[in-house]
Image (tube, helix red, strand yellow):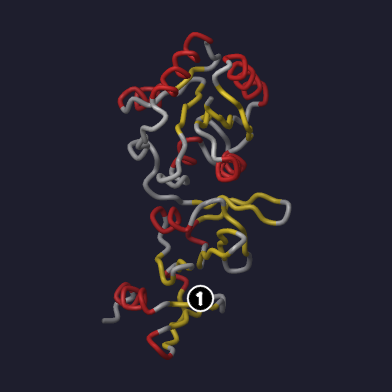
């Protein structure tokens, strides 16, 4: 039986779909979320086989959320939409599965059968997902934040997760360091750190080929030997 996560900001639509999936006897709904940020968190925690993803959601749409997921660990995605004709054509062209609201049981059963046949096949969503992210969803102390990528001075990972640092605040992101490196202007400077070149105030050269970045907000970021040469080249020093 396939495990599923339902992400939709409309409570009644979410509950109806969950009920239909459970009634099918073929899908085990292991979680739900009412926005993309909570959805990212649940995907990372629960690792469902398939996500039923609403397209029209506030702040971060379902399509934008796709580009925030690591392609290596991305679950199957079934898009759920009320009307977007342009999106429907894109799904048809790329053979992506989708459901129209209100959901018809016969169409849902067809989708479930398709999912069961293709559990091992990876789907490439790059044709419709944004190539670059202009915002990073984060969770702080009892709050959810949407941070523009231009405001991020650096990002790093530790045992508690991935964190982004702006001029005056630090927040935990549901995105991986790999996704941040590939989808934002942040550049790798250390195995555990990414830096925004525009946030660099100075680079202190240390012993053994190491270095340390001082950001415009006086934060310190380590630079390893492996990435120092590329960093200097990006800044115009050869």
Of 167 and 30, nearer the camera is: 30
| Residue visible at 56% across and 29% down in the picture | 4
Q: Is residue 226 left or right of residue 33?
A: left
Q: Is residue 167 left or right of residue 189?
A: right
Q: Residue furthest right?
A: 142
How many numbered marks appear? Answer: 1
Q: Is residue 81 above or below residue 37?
A: above
Q: Residue furthest bottom?
A: 207
Q: Is residue 115 above or below residue 182?
A: above
Helix, strand or loop at disc 1? strand
> Percent from the top left, x then y, of residue 13?
62, 21
Q: Residue furthest front?
A: 1
Res 196 visible: yes
**Which quarter of the picture shows residue 123?**
top left
Q: Residue furthest left?
A: 238
Q: Which residue corresponds to mark 1?
A: 221
Quadrant that contains the C terminus: bottom left
| Residue visible at 49% across and 13% down in the picture | 109
Res 59 visible: no
Q: Residues within 10 Å of mark 1 (few under 14, many from 20)?
A: many
Q: Is residue 102 left or right of residue 212?
A: right
**Which quarter of the picture shows residue 45?**
top right
Of 132 and 38, nearer the camera is: 38
> Percent from the top left, x then y, of residue 49?
50, 33
Of 56 and 112, nearer the camera is: 112
Q: Is residue 37 left or right of residue 204?
A: right
> Percent from the top left, x then y, of residue 158?
57, 65
> Percent from the top left, x then y, of residue 74?
45, 41
| Residue visible at 51% across and 76% down in the picture | 221
């Amino acid at each position: 039986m396939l495990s599923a996560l339902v992400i939709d900001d409309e409570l009644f639509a979410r509950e109806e779909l969950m009920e239909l999936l459970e009634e099918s006897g073929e899908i085990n709904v292991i979680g739900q979320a009412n926005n993309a940020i909570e959805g990212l968190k649940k995907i990372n925690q629960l690792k469902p086989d398939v996500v039923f993803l609403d397209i029209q959601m506030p702040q971060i749409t379902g399509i934008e959320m796709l580009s925030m997921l690591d392609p290596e660990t991305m679950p199957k995605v079934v898009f759920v939409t009320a009307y977007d004709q342009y999106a429907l054509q894109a799904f048809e062209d790329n053979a992506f599965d989708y459901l129209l609201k209100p959901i018809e049981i016969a169409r849902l059963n067809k989708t479930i059968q398709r999912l069961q046949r293709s559990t091992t096949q990876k789907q490439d969503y790059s044709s419709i997902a944004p190539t670059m992210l202009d915002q990073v969803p984060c969770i702080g102390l009892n709050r959810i934040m949407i941070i523009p990528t231009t405001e991020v001075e650096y990002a790093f990972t530790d045992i508690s997760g991935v964190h982004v640092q702006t001029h005056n605040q630090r927040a935990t992101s549901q995105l991986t360091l790999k996704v941040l490196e590939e989808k934002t202007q942040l550049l790798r400077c250390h195995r555990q750190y990414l830096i925004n070149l525009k946030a660099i105030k100075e680079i202190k050269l240390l012993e053994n080929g190491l270095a340390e970045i001082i950001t415009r907000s006086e934060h310190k970021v380590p630079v390893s030997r492996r990435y120092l040469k590329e960093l200097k080249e990006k800044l115009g020093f050869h």
